[in-house]
């Protein structure tokens, strides 16, 4: 499940023009894993596929590349069709999470199930609140 970071990821530019070092990125991903376990894993499970037939999978490259959608979903919640075709369920907002926790979850899930680490600045999250 652990992926190596690409060279592009190591030099990803954040909104303030600062460059995230490899160690900073690894630390953020590690913090994201812990935050995911505490806040997301109950429904989305450790493998990101979600509870069988109920919750949407996080293993969707289009989802994991969409900063705005990820931020909005974590802050404001989202309705999504159940995997078994049943009624839509609402993912409750996680607006109690800090900006750093949200950035860390996004880094973790995009690194684990996406094509590359998606780095989101705390300022981007603050602006979306």
Image (cartoon, grey):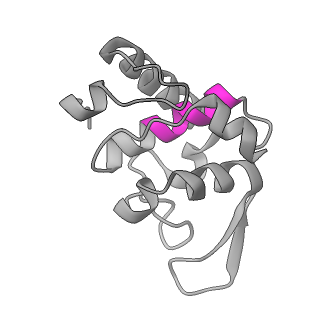
Q: Is residue 42 magenta?
A: no
User: Taking 38 as reference, is 89 left or right?
Assistant: right
Q: Residue at x 48, y 57 (%)?
A: 66
Q: Residue at x 27, y 49 (%)?
A: 115
Q: Check the image and report above or below for 94 versus 23.
A: below
| Residue 27: image location, x then y, percent | 43, 16
Q: Residue at x 35, y 60 (%)?
A: 61
The answer to which of 16 and 107 lies nearer the viewer is 16
Where does the N terminus fall, quadrant-wise? top left
Q: Is residue 100 magenta?
A: yes
Q: Quadrant of residue 30?
A: top left
Q: Residue at x 42, y 52 (%)?
A: 48
Per the rendered image, the range of residues in magenta is 99-107
| Residue 8: image location, x then y, percent | 24, 34
The answer to which of 15 and 25 lies nearer the viewer is 15
User: Taking 9 as reference, is 28 left or right?
Assistant: right
The answer to which of 53 and 22 lies nearer the viewer is 22
Q: Check the image and report above or below for 59 versus 31.
A: below
């Amino acid at each position: 499940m652990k992926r190596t970071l690409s060279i592009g990821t190591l030099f990803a530019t954040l909104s303030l023009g600062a460059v995230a070092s490899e160690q900073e990125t690894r630390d953020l991903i590690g913090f994201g894993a812990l935050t995911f376990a505490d806040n997301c894993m109950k429904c989305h499970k450790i493998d990101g596929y979600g509870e069988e037939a109920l919750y949407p999978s996080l293993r969707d490259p289009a989802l994991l590349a969409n900063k705005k959608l990820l931020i909005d979903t974590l802050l404001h919640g989202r309705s999504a069709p159940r995997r078994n075709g049943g009624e839509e369920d609402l993912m409750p907002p996680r607006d109690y999470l800090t900006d750093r926790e949200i950035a860390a979850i996004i880094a973790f899930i995009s690194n684990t199930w996406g094509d590359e680490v998606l780095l989101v600045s705390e300022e981007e999250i603050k602006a979306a609140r």
